[in-house]
Amino acid sequence: MPANELTLKSIEELKGYSFVIPSYQRGYRWGKDQVNDLINDINEFAQTRKDALPNDFYCLQPIVLKAVALDGKTLDCLPPEAKIESGVLRLRPSKKEESEQSDVIEYRYSPEKKKFIATNRFEVIDGQQRLTTIFLILNVLGEQPFDLSYETREDTTTALTAPEKASDERIDQWHIKQSWKIISQHKALKDEIWKKPFLNHTKVIWYEPENLSSDKDSIEIFSRINRGKIPLTNSELIRALFILETKKKKSREFNEYKIAAEWNFIEQQLHNNEFWCFITLGEPFEAKHLNKKEYPNRIEFLFDLIEEKNGGEKSHQTYFTFNMYAKKVKDGETVETLWQEIKNLYYRFHEWFIDDELYHLIGYLRLNNWMGLNDREKGKDNGLLSKASSIKQSELITIIKDKIKEKLDLENIDTWMYGGNNDQIKNALLIHNIAVYAQRRERFPFKKYTELKWDIEHIHARSDKVSGEKEQEEFMGQWISYFKTKRIDQECMNPLNNLYSKFKVAISPADKDQLFREFDQACATIEETENRIQNLALLDKGTNRSYKNAPFSVKREEIIKVEREKGLFILPGTKDVFSKAYSFQSNDNVVTMVAWGQEDRGAYRANIVSAIEKYLNNTNKEQANGSR
């Protein structure tokens, strides 16, 4: 077709062509809504135009193409059967060529060479989502599709011909497989009325822009016409920029295929959700607009990190990151250097992730947002990434441990009170649990932890939250049973027994409530019900609030139940509390399993402090001996 001229081609007419999706484009991403919309729109046309006239058609959006010349094949003279339309000669290949070329070869007249130059395929600048979906529809209908391939993505091309076997692990193939399932099950395709309008009366607008002399021209058009549709991301535009710039260099060592392979590898690794959760813990960006950003292409997180590091007044703009890289390339920075920076960032995160000690320390630090990845102070970069690149790993570990010790302020642990020091209590309980995992040579599951909301749970219920006659009576009975096991002298027990007996026979709710308050005060004279850390543990909000203010033994049974029957994640420190593991460690003769007493609290508090101090004060050599 002549440049800058629009023409219409039916789906049937597309069959003779060969299309290639260039490496600078993202893969196939259409979902359920887009596929159904396409089929339903065509179906509506088919149902209302059952006797469509030859010139009646349903028009799809344009496909924008660039003809790719067939090297060395030209025509000096025209064969007798040749018909030329708008400067284009379209011929069927000879029998010798049939096994090598597509069904159609087009010859474009070149005024410079004064010859017709052959082309057997077209680079798709825009419209790959529609073309891929049309290809899948033809496949389901049993029609011979046109040629369609993805440059540098051989497995995606293979998935098109056998979508039912496509991998669920690769994002392009997963989308192809899902679309194929939707198409296969769509009732419209089972109606013969639908097929003819689709093949012969559904047309695409064919458009070949002029002056497409270079790949750079292609990417500029690609970038411009895609905005406002399925939105292009910064990383997809950067990928196109990198690949097209690399193509111009024609280096054997560093080329577009190397970038594409490495890019796909990193993207695949970032789809390991445990790894992804680890590197995005806390709030990764100072820029507020990026804190809640979603990443369909996760590699964009790495580009955004570098963009945030460099800063900029226009960082709120949608394509700021891409524009920054485009400017770098324009200013002479090489793609190889820019790409190496991204790889180095990925490998730094990977290094932290696979090392158990760094995994735990950095994960905890980032979860609390105590040290940013790109923190700045007085114009200097003091973030984790900068420090990691300039000091030894052992020095980085020391810096992180010192930062955690400074923030925890463990020396004042006995002054912390629930309600006033909740952040300090929660941070101490969390690092205690991480220390437990490290001691057991296991990895703390940050992903599971971040998927739940957590409460600071009172191990022994607070009386001021106990309401209702039944709960109050259970609470009182629990304490009397507990004090009996501790052999509290009869003089102290008599007031408790009297109040309990009066409570059980009292009729008025107000009288019962008054007796319960007096009972609670009497208990406090014997043993204080504390709001300090020795009576606190971390528990997910759902479980904590489901049993309200149940006694200790009831809580233990509920925790065992939700873990065993529902598979709920319970922190090991909390499980050890309700199994009284800390009490058994310090005293073989645990008095009771039905209450949480003073001795239990003392053993628990001692373990919290000693475990955290040991974990944070261990030398690197000791830690290394405890790692996997």
Image: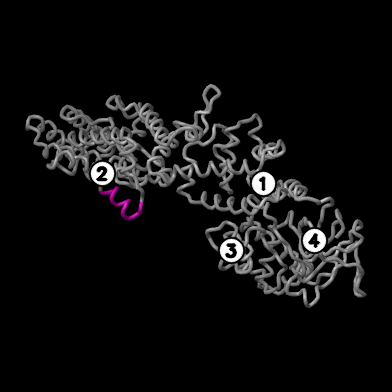
Q: Can you identify the residue that label 3 sits on? A: 177
The numbered mark at residue 242 is 1
* Residue nearer the viewer, 107 or 509: 107
Amino acid beneath label 4: Ala
Region of the chain picked out in magenta, as a range: 557-567
Q: Name the residue rendered at 81%, 70% in the picture.
A: 52
- In three-dimensional space, the C-alpha distance between marks 1 and 3, rounded to whole angstroms, equals 29 Å
Q: Residues within 10 Å of mark 1 (few under 14, many from 20)?
A: many
Q: Can you identify the residue that label 2 sits on? A: 576
Q: Residues within 10 Å of mark 3 (few under 14, many from 20)?
A: many
First reached walking from the N terminus: tag 3 or tag 4: 4
Determine the residue located farthest toward the top in the rendered image. 378
First reached walking from the N terminus: tag 4 or tag 1: 4
Amino acid beneath label 2: Asp
First reached walking from the N terminus: tag 1 or tag 3: 3
Q: Determine whether 109 is above or below 199 in the image.
A: above
314 vs 221, left or right, is left
